[in-house]
């Protein structure tokens, strides 16, 4: 079963907006980092759904690199 490409992008956009709202509204450092984490997850979802839609592995490889950035962010926090 596959998810339609438009639905995946709409969900990624909604996640990104929620993360951006968390970054802009909150003043605590931990909450700001959680908002950035949500935005990175939204970008990852967009990359994976795009790579599945166009049947290329470039987006999935980029997500692996993005997971490294996320791990470094968690190590800083």
Image (tube, grey):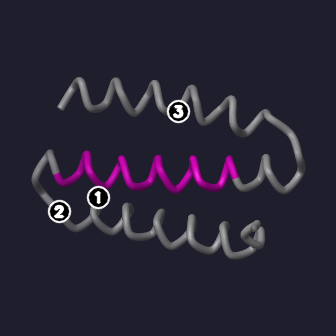
- For disc 3, the marked residue is 66
* Residue 46 counted in the magenta span: yes
Residue beneath disc 1: 23
C-alpha distance separating marks 1 and 2: 6 Å
Q: Is mark 3 on a helix, strand or loop?
A: helix
Q: Distance between the residues labelled 2 and 3?
A: 24 Å
Q: Tell me the SS state at disc 2.
A: loop
Which x, y percent locates residue 20?
38, 62
**63 w.r.t. 65: above or below:** below
Neighbour class for label 3 at 10 Å: few (<14), some, many (≥20)? some
5 vs 31, left or right, is right
Q: Give the range drawn in magenta.
A: 31-48
x, y percentage for residue 24? 28, 63
Q: Residue at x 48, y 63 (%)?
A: 16
Mark 1 or 3: in front is 3
Cβ–Cβ below 8 Å for labels 2 and 3? no
Q: Is residue 68 above or below residue 63?
A: above
Mark 2 highlights which residue?
Answer: 26
Report the quarter where the C terminus lies: top left
Residue 9, numbered label: none
Q: Report the residue that reaches farthest toward the left.
A: 28
Identified at 66% across, 68% down, the residue is: 8
Q: Is residue 69 above or below residue 6?
A: above
Q: How crowded is mark 1: few (under 14 residues within 10 Å), some or many (20 or more)?
A: many
């Amino acid at each position: 079963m596959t998810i339609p490409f438009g639905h995946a992008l709409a969900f990624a956009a909604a996640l990104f907006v929620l993360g951006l709202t968390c970054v802009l509204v909150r003043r605590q450092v931990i909450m700001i980092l959680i908002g950035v984490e949500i935005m990175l997850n939204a970008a990852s979802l967009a990359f994976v759904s795009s790579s599945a839609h166009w049947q290329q592995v470039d987006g999935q490889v980029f997500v692996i690199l993005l997971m490294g950035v996320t791990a470094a962010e968690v190590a800083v926090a």
